[in-house]
Image (cartoon, rainbow, N blue to C red):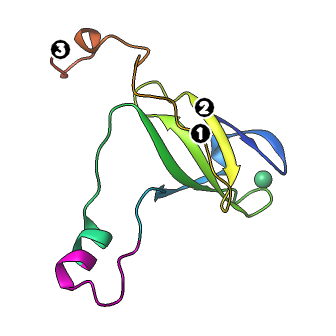
Amino acid sequence: MIRIDCPSCGGRDEVEFAYRGDATVVRPAGDAGEEAFHDFVYRRANPRGWHVEWWYHQAGCRQFLKVVRHTMTHEVHAVARAGDRVEVPAAEHTGVPAAEHKGVPAA
Ligand SMILES: [Zn+2]
């Protein structure tokens, strides 16, 4: 269970939220070309570590939030309103040694 500390509502369980995607993707300029828009719509990284994501508080204040979540441990580092900046920790410990993860070879 992920616990998200909404700036308006306080700490809530993830069941009140809807994941809305990668918050690091930037829309290309209008004249950027078909391939740039293809990448914008369909291509996503699958990072291992800290990731900035959009979460929608659908059962609460109905705001979009930026959540910095660790993709391996689901730890939430920071939560901010959509227009605010969030601090992303440097890539470091994953909380779980890579060798202990099933199906993920040690780096
Ligand atoms: Zn809220």
In the image, taking residue 27 as reference, residue 80 lies left or right, namely right
The mark that comes first in sequence, 3 or 2, is 2
- For the N terminus, the quadrant is top right
Residue at 60 percent across and 31 percent down: it is 77
Q: Mark 2 points at which residue?
A: 77
> Disc 2 vs disc 1: Cβ atoms closer than 8 Å?
yes
**Residue 11, x across and y down, in percent:** 78, 37
In the image, taking residue 65 as reference, residue 45 lies left or right, namely left
User: Is residue 78 visible in the rendered structure shown here?
Assistant: yes
User: Is residue 1 visible in the rendered structure shown here?
Assistant: no
Few, some or many C-alpha atoms within 10 Å of disc 3 (few <14, some 14-19, many ≥20)?
few
Q: What span is colored magenta in the figure?
A: 27-37
Q: In terms of depth relative to the viewer, which is nearer, 12 or 50?
A: 50
Q: Name the residue under label 3.
A: 106
Residue at 72 percent across and 63 percent down: it is 63
> Disc 3 vs disc 1: Cβ atoms closer than 8 Å?
no
Q: Examine the rendered structure and indicate whether residue 12 appears above or below residue 54.
A: above
Q: Examine the rendered structure and indicate whether residue 49 appears above or below residue 14.
A: above
Q: Name the residue under label 1.
A: 87
**Residue 86, x across and y down, in percent:** 61, 45
